Image: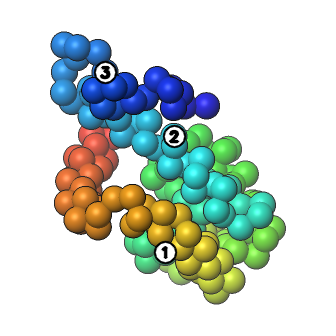
Amino acid sequence: MTEESDSESVSKSGPRPAGLAGDPIEFAVMNEIGMINQLAGNLFQSHLPKGMTVAQFSVLNHLLRLEVEETISELARAMQVAQPTMSSTVRRLEDKGLVELVHDPDDRRIRRVAVTETGAKLRNDAVAALGPMAEMFRQNMPSSIWHELLPQLNRIRVFLDKQRG
């Protein structure tokens, strides 16, 4: 459930602000991003293939986007989850044939998570299945909004990523 219901989120004067009067703008923006994340995550989950979670999709997307193979520890750090949580996610992906654990060529004791062809196809099919959701956005918001937002959101993400320990 979202923080605000539909009846609360829009008043006669427009959408309610993300924070309270006097809150720092940075807090209001981060709060807004958090609410968007919750809403978008639920919408995205409803469009993923049956049995796939957003966490599983995120692992596939991460590895493919960066064109890397990573250890479970590296993935856990990247996704900011506990190692046992990531182990479970990877195990489920492996059971579905979407990833495989491969030995590191420099140290055979280390095993890295690699996306299989099936995993890459499923990821791409999942993105393609988002067509109706993308069309809904296109019908309700001009593409210029998305093109203006992406570089700014990317800048915030990169900054926040650098702040991690």
On residue 22, the disc is none
Q: Secondary structure at mark 1?
A: helix
What is the distance, in whole Å, between disc 1 and disc 3 at their CAs?
A: 36 Å
* Residue 1 visible to the viewer: yes
Counting from the top left corner in percent of width and height, residue 122 is at 65, 77
Mark 1 or mark 3: which is in front? Answer: 3
Q: Quadrant of the C terminus?
A: top left
What is the distance, in whole Å, between disc 2 and disc 1 at their CAs?
A: 24 Å
Quick check: 53 above or below 49? above
Mark 2 or mark 1: which is in front? Answer: 2
Amino acid on which the number 3 mark rests in the picture: Gly
On residue 38, the disc is 2
Amino acid on which the number 1 mark rests in the picture: Leu
Q: Farthest residue in the right direction? A: 95
Q: Secondary structure at mark 2?
A: helix
Quick check: 120 above or below 20? below
Query: Which numbered disc, 1 or 3, marks the residue that appears first in the sequence?
Result: 3
Report which residue position mark 1 lands on.
64
